[in-house]
Image: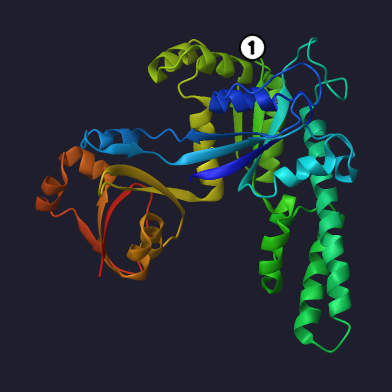
Amino acid sequence: MGFSCGLVGLPNAGKSTIFNALSGAGARVESYPFCTIEANRAAVEVPDDRLTSLAAFFPDKERVPTVLEIVDVAGLVHGASEGEGMGNRFLSEIRAVDAVLHVVRCFEDDNVAHVTGSIDPRRDIETVSTELLLKDLETIGRIVESARRQAKGSDRTAAARRAAWEQLHDGIARGIPLRKQELPHEIHDGLRDAAPLTAKPVLFVANLGDDDGESHRKAVESVAAEEGTPFVAIRGRVEAEIVDAADDPEERLAFLSQWGLERTGLDRLVRAGYDLLRLVTFYTFEGPEVRAWTVPEGTLAPQAGGRVHSDFEQRFVIADVMRIEELLEAGSEKALREAGAVHRAGHDYEVRDGDVIRFVSA
């Protein structure tokens, strides 16, 4: 698994169109609100030229990429935190994802209704963000009440937890999402169980129309800069049509080039998502597979090995590490070893993006 993301936004922002552009899954798209009722889900191969080049060395082995899971849910309207629109049903769908992709409408189209009557990306972003905050205010509020009941005695630990939850609740009440708050260590486990919505990293996706939509795109980019979070602009309808019309990746790129695009929206979004979540990719070619693996930055060699097989973590001895660009240039592992460019790594080695690793266990 690479990472999972949930598409959020107002109705008719083009979430299902973006979903189709990224996944080619053919989700239903209509010009009225709440066309999406049941969540659409897709597992999409993460574009990876390095894996393709590495797999070419082993034509008899299966190429196995990492995967991006995408969840497209019903549009979020004012009052969703209190059950308006799809309400709580919508909000529950995004509790389990790693990141939120906030799709913002940046296209003019008289045939596609807008729930507020006009295109205003900054206002639309604020509407969605407010509903997520209100839902977390409700969720954390319930936890605060429970913590207060548990802290009525002299238990200092319970009192510390109560104070920590109250601190977070006060911050949310002042409009500060949890991802911008200092999260007290006393309640880390409780936060993981509660899965608050505003704790999740956010990546803004400006859904452009056939025209440039420059002013609307800049508005989204400006908000993203203020939030300190990535921003990707995608011509949703164009890319969805290209994905539907062309199966061959080279043919798709040829169509994209006519719009001045060098990479697909999926490629650009994955890169931004990996940066946002601080993920790295390493590679293995043991057994019948040439495979890419995704782990957080700072993952140590034994834990990375555990992703491949539990024995590599539990009985880790050492790892032989190659850099993929050096391996591709050398042409083989044997040539790289002869050049002295295969490095031995121990228990404290932090896996880097682009490592090719052979794990050795006892």
Q: Is residue 78 above or below residue 182?
A: above
Q: Is residue 13 visible?
A: yes
Residue most toward the bottom?
154
Label 1 CA crowd tier, 10 Å (few <14, some 14–19, many 20+): few
Residue 228 lies left or right of residue 312; in this view the side is: right
Q: Tag count in the figure?
A: 1
Tell me the quarter of the picture where residue 306 sits: bottom left
Q: Position of residue 97 (x, y in %)?
A: 63, 47
Q: Residue visible at 65% across and 22% down?
A: 17
- Position of residue 290 measured from the top left corner of the image (x, y, whole percent): 29, 42
Classify residue 188 as left or right of residue 302: right
Q: Measuring 80% from the left and 32% from the top, which residue is drawn there?
A: 124
What x and y, as percent, mark residue 186? 70, 74
The image quarter containing residue 217 is: top right
Q: Amino acid at mark 1?
A: Asp
Is 103 placed above or below 242 here?
A: below
Q: Tell me if I can see residue 181 in this picture.
A: no
Q: Is residue 264 left or right of residue 308?
A: right
Q: Secondary structure at mark 1?
A: loop
Q: Name the residue tied to disc 1.
A: 210
Counting from the top left corner in percent of width and height, residue 141 is at 86, 61
Q: In the rendered view, tell whether residue 154 sits above or below residue 144.
A: below
